[in-house]
Image (tube, rainbow, N blue to C red):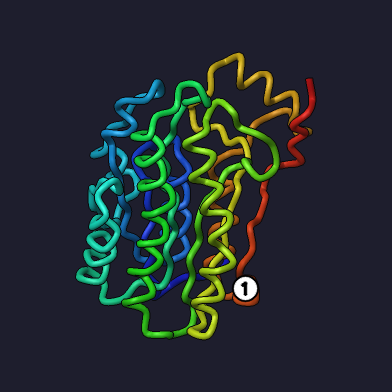
Amino acid sequence: METLAGRTAVVTGVSRRAGIGFAVARELLACGARVLVQSWTAHDDEQPWGGDDLGALLAELGDVAHVAADFADPGAPALVMGRAVELFGHVDVLVANHARSSQQSLTELTAEELDLSWAVNGRASVLLTQAFAAQHDSRPGGRVILFTSGQHLAPMPDELPYAISKGAIHQMTLSLSDALADRGITVNTVNPGPVDTGWATPDLAAHVGRALPAGRWGRPEEVARLVRWLASDDAAWITGQVINSEGGFRRWTP
């Protein structure tokens, strides 16, 4: 396992023990990194899958710093990064895993939801990257890891605000990587494919499962291992890439 000893990571979207953010934070801690996690439980509380016990989550992670922040606020990314710098002096790795889910079709979507999805998913990812770059002193190991979805591989007509804002992250990856390449900072984006984080209905879980060669959804820890590798020295030559980690997902299986 790659070591991240002596490095500090900020991981956003860590609010459910079943989630990808929790698995990523746990993986980075296991590799020796110091970790600050961000959460905004109000979003999960309003979703069908519901929230989690944040105190129990943080206790399970162990030696981790935490800040609650709503990325609908344009000042929140700088606040999160500033808190990490205050505690640890420097941040080496940014994992922008957070996401606002939105179930709106073309007939249902509203300007308010379009703006909010962009603010949380797209704008916050850019501003987090900006804040990360502002504090980074060009020491080796600078890493930015963003998250998109499968909107570039198949349509998502019932989740338009979400798909559009995630598409922006896909498209910003190469430009952000070029902006930071001369400072030795890599920027990559992960599309984790269908991951079992407890959000899918039984019917959807079964339908999608049939389209995955392994007969199951991805697991959060499988995404976490990819993130850990991208954060490590072994991935220093990889930048500007959108990596699809989907287990051979056959989207058009009936």
Q: Image point 41% across, 46% down: which residue? A: 118
**Residue in view at x 55 percent, y 71 percent:** 177
The residue drawn where x is 33% and y is 76% is 134
Q: Quadrant of residue 131?
A: bottom left
| Snapshot quadrant of residue 30 | bottom left
- Closer to the camera, 69 or 161? 161
Q: Amino acid at mark 1?
A: Asp
- For residue 233, above or below residue 204: below
- Quarter containing the N terminus: bottom right
Q: Is residue 166 above or below residue 213?
A: below
Q: Position of residue 232 (x, y in %)?
A: 55, 70
Can you tell which quarter of the image residue 8 is in?
A: bottom left
State the image coordinates of residue 59 (x, y, percent, origin top left): 27, 44
* Left or right: 28 as drawn, with respect to 206: left
Outermost residue, top direction?
A: 203
Few, some or many residues within 10 Å of mark 1 (<14, 14–19, 20+): few
Specify the quadrant that holds the C terminus.
top right
| Image coords of residue 170 (percent x, y) | 58, 54
Residue highlighted by disc 1? 234
Residue 159: image x %, image y %? 52, 30
- The answer to whether residue 211 is left or right of residue 28 is right
Residue 179 against residue 128 in the figure, above or below: below
Rendered residue at 49%/70% (across/down): 143
Q: Secondary structure at mark 1?
A: helix
Name the side, left or right, on which 41 lies relative to 243: left
